[in-house]
C-alpha cells in the first residue's frame, strides 16, 4: 500500500475510523500516530468519566494489530478480562459513546452483547476466555465453518486461574482446531503477578525470541511465538498472520507495559492506575478525594487484630490492595498470601491453614466469592473450620455493572451449614464484628461490606437479645418493624421518620449477625403488625427468606415484606441510583410499606401476605 502524502499524514487518523474495515486500510506508516491518538483519547475520556485506564493504555498497539489481522465479528475475539477491551470498543464504532462511559444508560465498561456484534462475551470474571474459545472452535468445526478463526486475548494475571489451564489442556490436545491465544504479558494483574507461572514467563521474556524453545505451552500442544513487542503494531501483526495461517493452536506471547504512554500510570507502581474515578489527567490524582472507605476500615482493623492475635493470617486472589490487605502485608508480610486469580484455591488453601492451627481471613470481592461456593461448602464448612470470609463490594457496586454487583452472596451462603454471616451497619460494627469473627474457633464466619465511603457510626438506643434497636417511636403502638441488613440501616432510619409522619409507630432493629437468624428476632417480629426485611442482595433465598422461615417455625403470624434486589442482572449505574430504583432508599422503603398497608403491593420489592390496615393478612 502506498505511503500517504504529507497532507494526509498530518490529518488525524482516528477520527476517520468507524469500524475495523477502515482500520485495515490505514498505511503501516500511520499506525504509530494512530496508536498515539487512541492513547490520548483514552486518557482524556477515562480521566473524565472514570474506568479502567492502565490496562487499556497497555492494549493499544496489540488491539490495532488484532483488528487488522482478524475479521471481527466473523472471526471471534474474546477478551479476558473484559476491562482491557476499551480499544476494541473504540475500533468497532463506539468512540462517541465514551462520553457516557460506565454511566447509567451509557457505554458499558466491559464488552456488551447489547452494544455490538463485535462483543461475544460480557466477561469480567477472569480465566474464562480460553474455555469460550475452545467451545467456539468446536462449534465452528461441527458446523463446517472451520475457516473462522477464534482468538482469546488473556492477561498474564488471568492465566493464574485454574480454569484457564483446564481450557489450555483441552485446546492443546486438539491440534486441528485453529485457536490463537494472545498472552498479554505485562507482569501484573492489579499488582505484580506472583507464583511459578510468573517466574516461567519472566524466563521466557529474558530468553528473548527463542520461538523454538520448549516451554509449558509447547508441552501442552501449542506452537509458541514470542516474546514479541506488544507495542510494535507491525511486529505483532506479522506474528498474528503467521499464527492464523497455521490453522492449529498457537500461543502468541506479547510483552506490554500497563499504563503505557501515561506518566502517572507508569510511575504508579502499586497498580498503574488500574481503575480510576474522575481524575486530573495531568497528575492522575482524584478530582475529589474520597473519604475513608469500608475497605480502608477493614484493612486497618485486620492489621490491628493481626498484631495481637498471632494465629490470624490472610489470603486474597490478586486483590491485595483493592481488598485492603496491603496494610497487613506491610506489617506482617509472611502472614499474607496472594494466590493469584484463583478463588477456589484460596478458599481450600485457607482450609488447610485452619487445619494447621491458624485462623485465615479470606478477602475477596463478593462477586468473585461466588466462584468458590463449593469450596466454602465442602472444604471449609463440612470440616467446621475457623475461616473468616470478607466479601468486599457486597450488594450494588455501581458502574462496573452486572458481573460485578455483589448481590448473590447472601442467597448462596445462606445454604451453607454452620456458616455465621455478619453485615455491619457502620465502621464501629465492622471493627467489633471482625474481631468477634476472628475469635470463632468452631466453624466458618463471613462479613460483607459495600463499595462506598464509610458513613458515621449509628449507635443503638437499646439492645434486645443481641439485637441492636436503632430507632423506636416514642408513645406509639408497635406498627412496623424494619430489619435492615448492614449499611441499609441508614435508609431504614430515613424510612422510619417518613412512616412516623404518617402516624405509624416504627422500630428499626439491626441483628448484626444476620444468618443464622437470631432466635430473638421472631419474638420481636411478633410484637409488631408488620415486619419488613431490607437487604441489598437478591430477595430469593436471602436474609428475608430466612427470617420469614424462622418466624413460621416459631409460629409467628405477623405479615412480612421482603425488600431486596430482583432476581435479575442489574445494569451499571451509580450505587445510589440503583438502590433507589430497587426501592431500597428511605422514600422507597416507606412507600412500599404504605402501599402494603393499603393493599397495594409492588411485586418487585415485597413478598409475603399483604396486611390490611388492621394488621390481618389478606
Image (cartoon, rainbow, N blue to C red):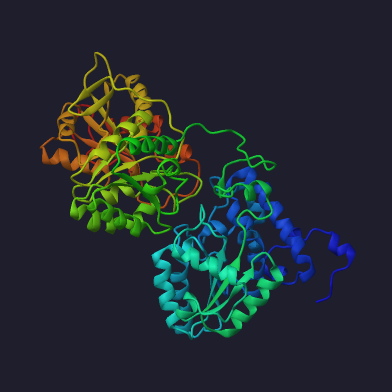
- Farthest residue to the right: give it: 6
Q: Position of residue 541 (x, y in %)?
A: 26, 48
| Residue drawn 45% across the image and 42% down it | 330
> Where residue 81 sits in the image (x, y, percent)?
50, 60
Choose between 350 and 250: the one closer to the eye.
350
Is residue 58 found left or right of 447 in the rendered image?
Answer: right
Residue 438: name its quadrant: top left
Q: Nearer the viewer, residue 271 or 36?
A: 271
State which quarter of the image contains the C terminus. top left
Looking at the image, residue 499 lies above or below residue 322 = above
Residue at 29% x, 57% y: name it.
348
Tell whether 543 sits left or right of 60.
left
| Residue 585 placement (x, y as % from top left) | 40, 33
Q: How many marks?
A: 0
- Image quadrant in which you'd find residue 478: top left
Q: Is residue 51 left or right of residue 36?
A: left
Q: Is residue 581 visible?
A: yes
| Above-or-below relation of 82 to 166 | above
Residue 38, compared with residue 405, is above or below; it is below
Q: Is residue 7 left or right of residue 208?
A: right
Amino acid at each position: 500500500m502506498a505511503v500517504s502524502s504529507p497532507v494526509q499524514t498530518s490529518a488525524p487518523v482516528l477520527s476517520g475510523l468507524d469500524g475495523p474495515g477502515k482500520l485495515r486500510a490505514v498505511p503501516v506508516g500511520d499506525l504509530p500516530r494512530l496508536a498515539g491518538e487512541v492513547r490520548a483519547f483514552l486518557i482524556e475520556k477515562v480521566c473524565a468519566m472514570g474506568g479502567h485506564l492502565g490496562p487499556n493504555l497497555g492494549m493499544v498497539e496489540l488491539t490495532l494489530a488484532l483488528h487488522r489481522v482478524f475479521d471481527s465479528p466473523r472471526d471471534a475475539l474474546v477478551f479476558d478480562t473484559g476491562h482491557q477491551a476499551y480499544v476494541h470498543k473504540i475500533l468497532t464504532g463506539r468512540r462517541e459513546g465514551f462520553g457516557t462511559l460506565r454511566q447509567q444508560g451509557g457505554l458499558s465498561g466491559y464488552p456488551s452483547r447489547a452494544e455490538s456484534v463485535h462483543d461475544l462475551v460480557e466477561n469480567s470474571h477472569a480465566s474464562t476466555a480460553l474455555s469460550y474459545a475452545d467451545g467456539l472452535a468446536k462449534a465452528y468445526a461441527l458446523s463446517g465453518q472451520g475457516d473462522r478463526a477464534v482468538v482469546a486475548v488473556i492477561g498474564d494475571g488471568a492465566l493464574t486461574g485454574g480454569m484457564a489451564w483446564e481450557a489450555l489442556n483441552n485446546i492443546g490436545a486438539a491440534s486441528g482446531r485453529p485457536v490463537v491465544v494472545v498472552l498479554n504479558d505485562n507482569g501484573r494483574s492489579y499488582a505484580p503477578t506472583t507464583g511459578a507461572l510468573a517466574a516461567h514467563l519472566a524466563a521466557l521474556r529474558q530468553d528473548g525470541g527463542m520461538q523454538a524453545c520448549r516451554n509449558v505451552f509447547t508441552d501442552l500442544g501449542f506452537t509458541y511465538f514470542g516474546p514479541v513487542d506488544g507495542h510494535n503494531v507491525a511486529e505483532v501483526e506479522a506474528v498474528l498472520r503467521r499464527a492464523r495461517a497455521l490453522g492449529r493452536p498457537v500461543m502468541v506471547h506479547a510483552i506490554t507495559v500497563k499504563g503505557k504512554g501515561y506518566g502517572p500510570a507508569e510511575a504508579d507502581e502499586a497498580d498503574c492506575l488500574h481503575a480510576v474515578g474522575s481524575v486530573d489527567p495531568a497528575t492522575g490524582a482524584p478530582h475529589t478525594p474520597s473519604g475513608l472507605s469500608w475497605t480502608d476500615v477493614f484493612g486497618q482493623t485486620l492489621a490491628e487484630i493481626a498484631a495481637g492475635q498471632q494465629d490470624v493470617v490472610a489470603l486474597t486472589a490478586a486483590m491485595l490492595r483493592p481488598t485492603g490487605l496491603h496494610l497487613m502485608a506491610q506489617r506482617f508480610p509472611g502472614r499474607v498470601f496472594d494466590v493469584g486469580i484463583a478463588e477456589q484455591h484460596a478458599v481450600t488453601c485457607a482450609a488447610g491453614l485452619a487445619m494447621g492451627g491458624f485462623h485465615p481471613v479470606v478477602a475477596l470481592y463478593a462477586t468473585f466469592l461466588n466462584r468458590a461456593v463449593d469450596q466454602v461448602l465442602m472444604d471449609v464448612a463440612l470440616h467446621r473450620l475457623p475461616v473468616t470470609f470478607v466479601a468486599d463490594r457486597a450488594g450494588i457496586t455501581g458502574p462496573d455493572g452486572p458481573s460485578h454487583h455483589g448481590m448473590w452472596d447472601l442467597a448462596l451462603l445462606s445454604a451453607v451449614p454452620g456458616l455465621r454471616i455478619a453485615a455491619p451497619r457502620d465502621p464501629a460494627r465492622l471493627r467489633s464484628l471482625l474481631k468477634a469473627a476472628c475469635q470463632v474457633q468452631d466453624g466458618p464466619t463471613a462479613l460483607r461490606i459495600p463499595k462506598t465511603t464509610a458513613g458515621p457510626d449509628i449507635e443503638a438506643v437499646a439492645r434486645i437479645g443481641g439485637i441492636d434497636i436503632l430507632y423506636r417511636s416514642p408513645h406509639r403502638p408497635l406498627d412496623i418493624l424494619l430489619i435492615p441488613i448492614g449499611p441499609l440501616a441508614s435508609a431504614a432510619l430515613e424510612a422510619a421518620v417518613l412512616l412516623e409522619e404518617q402516624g405509624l409507630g416504627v422500630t428499626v432493629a439491626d441483628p448484626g449477625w444476620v444468618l443464622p437468624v437470631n432466635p430473638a428476632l421472631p419474638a420481636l417480629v411478633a410484637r409488631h403488625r408488620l415486619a419488613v426485611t431490607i437487604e441489598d442482595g437478591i430477595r430469593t433465598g436471602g436474609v428475608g427468606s430466612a427470617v420469614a422461615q424462622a418466624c413460621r417455625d416459631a409460629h409467628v403470624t405477623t405479615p412480612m415484606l421482603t425488600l431486596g434486589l430482583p432476581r435479575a442482572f442489574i445494569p451499571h449505574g451509580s450505587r445510589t441510583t440503583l438502590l433507589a430504583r430497587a426501592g431500597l432508599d428511605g422514600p422507597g422503603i416507606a412507600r412500599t410499606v404504605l402501599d402494603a398497608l393499603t393493599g397495594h403491593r409492588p411485586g418487585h420489592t415485597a413478598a409475603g401476605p399483604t396486611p390490611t390496615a388492621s394488621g390481618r393478612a389478606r
